[in-house]
Image (cartoon, grey):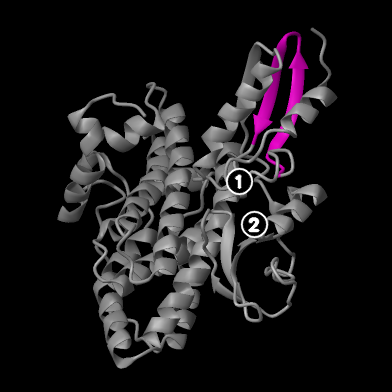
Amino acid sequence: MTRDMAFFEFLLRMGDNTLVLGHRVSEWCGHAPVLEEDIALANTALDLIGQTQMWLGLAGEVEGQGRSADDLAMLRDAWDFRNVLLAEQPNGDFGQTMMRQYLFDQAHVLLLEKLAGSSDERVAAIAAKSVKEVAYHVERSRDTVIGLGDGTSESHRRMQAALDLLWPYAGEMFTDDEVSGIMAGEGIAPEPSSLRAAWDAAVQQTMSEATLVIPDSDFAHAGGKTGFRHTEHLGHMLTQMQWLQRAYPGARW
Amino acid sequence: MTVSVDQIWGWLDEVPDPEIPVISVVDLGIVREVVLEGETVKVAVTPTYSGCPATSVISMDIETALRDRGIKDVKIETRIAPAWTTDWLSEKGRSRLEDYGIAPPQPAGGPERCPHCGSRNVTRVSQFGSTPCKAHWRCTDCLEPFDYFKCI
């Protein structure tokens, strides 16, 4: 694999994570349990979609085939997406959405902090911009996980169920492979495994405050960021997200 | 026609922010550079939040404002580094925000006082508000809700 191929893959991983999670979160718009949460979710989704424009914009530039961020977002099928499986998992109830968000945000903020020092100045610029927004995301998702985990017996039960359900999807964020090896070698991005200890420490602290128990097993589903095998949920999500461009190719605002 | 860079800055200071029309795009600190190259005016604009829907409207408003002044060739460049910070809000912008009912950003991370009654007894409702750049607060004296322009 050449450096540019690996760089393109890396940028798709960044942009597809924010795109797919951003779309998932946007599905709450108008449906959240209270107005303040609806607004917070919509704002989070908006930040993530904005970050997607920058990551996929750069991906298209690096690829050099003339594809724009919109082309990459709207005209690829499931097997070409490089997001982690965690991001595409369905929203479930509000607690499950916030647990997914926290597990992701905590890894996202650690990664962006490192990427702000990337040897590629375009990556560093996008990361420096994004990390300010993501700092607000993780503050909120962490507080919400703690509030609901250490809440009523019903909210506690739901948060523990969400953690049990989503935990096997968290490990994929920290696996290394050829792409990440090339990126680390170039000083563009850290090996994902190098972020694990800091993530574990933060998540353990949060779950302990939330009175939630982290599952014993470290089994991790894989296949999202390599595109080898997504869960069935991604395809269903794309039928909604890409519907307009599929039905009316090239439609513009 | 002959124009100076200072003149252009003055014109841009009359372009209102589309979401918060009491402050200008210059007050907001998002106009990073104005360059005059022959007949061409180049304006570098930085987004507040990466997903802020006002960004494209702002670029269009800047272009329209300059064309209305007779500038035919306008180039808008989006510049993301260094990332926008609320430290770039002008003093004029800060006081206008408060008059408008939006508490200006403070280094402490929360509003100094209620923009309606001036009370220091304020409480946070949500870190996210009506636009990406604002948080939602409430005054515990006059009981009115208000927006706080959050630090970033």
Q: Is residue A153 left or right of residue B101?
A: left
Q: Residues within 10 Å of mark 1 (few under 14, many from 20)?
A: many
Cα separation between marks 1 and 2: 9 Å
Q: Residues within 10 Å of mark 2 (few under 14, many from 20)?
A: many
Q: Is residue B102 left or right of residue A79?
A: right
Please tell me whether residue A16 belongs to the stretch shown in magenta. no
Q: Main secondary structure of the magenta part?
A: strand
Percent coordinates x, y for residue A117 in the rendering = 62, 49
The residue segment tinted magenta is B28-45
Residue B65 visible in the displayed image: yes
Residue at image position (65%, 12%) is B73
Residue at image position (52%, 63%) is B128
Where A233 sits versus B70, above or below? below
Q: How many marks?
A: 2
Q: Quadrant of the C terminus of chain B?
A: bottom right
Instruction: Read off the residue under disc 2.
Output: B152
Where A137 sits versus B3, above or below? below
Q: Are marks 1 and 2 on the same chain?
A: yes
Please tell me whether residue B33 belongs to the stretch shown in magenta. yes
Specify the quadrant of the image occupied by residue A207: bottom left
Amino acid found under the numbered disc labelled 2: Ile
Instruction: Read off the residue under disc 1.
Output: B48
Residue at image position (75%, 52%) is B96
Percent coordinates x, y for residue A171 in the rendering = 34, 65
**Disc 1 element:** loop
Percent coordinates x, y for residue B43 in the rendering = 68, 26
Amino acid found under the numbered disc labelled 1: Thr
Residue A66 tag number: none
CB within 8 Å, label 1 to label 2: yes
> In which chain is the residue bearing label 1?
B
